[in-house]
Image (cartoon, rainbow, N blue to C red):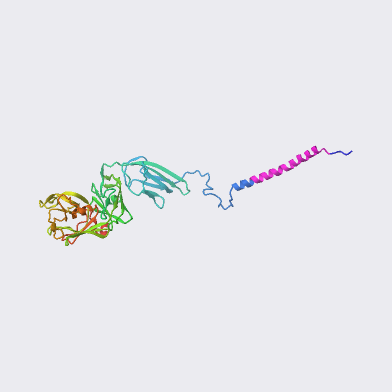
Amino acid sequence: MKRQPISGTSAGTRRERGSRRGGPGLLALLLGAMLLFVTACAGSDSGDGKGKKDGAGKAGDTQASQAVVTIAPKDDAKNVATSGALKIGADKGRLTSVKVEDTKGNEVEGKITADGTSWEPAHHLGAATRYKVHAIAKDSEGRESAKDTTFTTLVPKNTFVSYFTPEDGSTVGVGMPVSLRFSRGITAPEDVEKAVKVTAEPSVPIEGHWFGNDRLDFRPEKYWAAGTKVTLKLNLDGVEGRPGVYGKQSKTVRFTVGRSQVSVVDAKAYTMTVKRDGKVFKTIPITAGAPSTTTYNGQMVISEKYKVTRMNGATVGFGGEYDIKDVPHAMRLSTSGTFIHGNYWAGAGTFGSANVSHGCVGLRDVRGGWDKEAPAAWFFNNSILGDVVVVKNSNDKQIQPDNGLNGWNMSWAEWKK
């Protein structure tokens, strides 16, 4: 009798052996896959170093930076000068970042030198102000070193300010310069001028000129273009204008140039031609200075306007020759007393035929200035500060550039000196 195999036992034996034979093969596959994964994660470095990131090979470098940031004045210094005292440098390295700001977060402009060894502010510091400094330098290995300090600038005992023309937000004529008068005489004009910035939109070259030691005017080469927007920035706070005397003014002033109006007075023809935006707008009969008291020639800018004012000859060197308490529609053309104004006391036939004034330009008017149709009233109502009045053909000299806002009587080359 033949024996039949017990299928369950034999089959189980074969599966068990098969499992033991298959075990090592699976493990090998798993190990191979892990090896590939590890190789992929390690990158594709081919041995030429191109697969390494910057700084590879310096891992574990714990040496301190050799760069040393230097700052003067010392930390927590008091009564620091506003100019020349702040200096930031780097030894055995290069400056990469410098930040200087006051307690309000206003940053001080400055520039790192091309070689990275120093930084200085672009302008003076404010007085009585606390500043903090944060500077970073790197050595030749790229390791950084930083330094933080604070200091406080001096509190000035003596100060000065500027009184500026025109006013903020005003609309002026094309001849209006930016004029600054200082409350103290300035002995460091370059430092003060550096702290004043005048810009225009559209842009045009603008230069400053000093008249004496207490007045600084700015103007372009030619009259402003109509519609120009001008900005004056005063950064005088902390400027040492004279030994021990510091500015205390930081202000931004903006004004707009309106339409162009230039009026030409011909003293021989007894007329004034008003030009608006380059075109003749109106011709008005006038009376100019008499032969013994002639009117200055030259370009004059209207600097003040009065509906009525008093004119006393004693205030301008004429003794008691006249004292008129109610001169109507008066507009100042010079500091020395030249006006263009209404005249109600001369006969109507005088205007356009004779010069009888004490140096002013007179236009027909009525006492009290109530007649809006009178030439003086019309011209007053159609003029703004900064409009130009040019006088020609008078038997007098040209007005001095500093006599009023009249720097236009100086050539551009002279102005820039």
Point out the image quarter for the N terminus: top right
How many discs appear?
0
Is residue 35 at all visible to an observer of this figure? yes
Magenta stretch contains residue 17: yes
Q: Position of residue 17 (x, y in %)?
A: 76, 40
* Residue nearest the viewer, comparing 155 with 412: 412
Q: Position of residue 21 (x, y in %)?
A: 74, 42
Q: Is residue 20 left or right of residue 253?
A: right
Task: Name which residue lies at 44% across and 44% down.
Answer: 145
Residue farthest to the left? 320
Q: Position of residue 351 (x, y in %)?
A: 15, 58
Q: Position of residue 139 (x, y in %)?
A: 45, 48
Identify whether 347 is placed above or below 102: below
Q: Is residue 399 left or right of residue 72?
A: left
Point out the image quarter for the C terminus: bottom left
Main secondary structure type of the part rendered in magenta: helix
* Residue nearest the viewer, comparing 320 with 54: 320
Is residue 332 at all visible to an observer of this figure? no
Task: Name which residue lies at 71% across and 42% down.
Answer: 23
Task: Name which residue lies at 21% across and 54% down.
Answer: 378
Residues rendered magenta in the picture:
5-34
Magenta stretch contains residue 384: no
* Residue nearest the viewer, comparing 409 with 353: 353
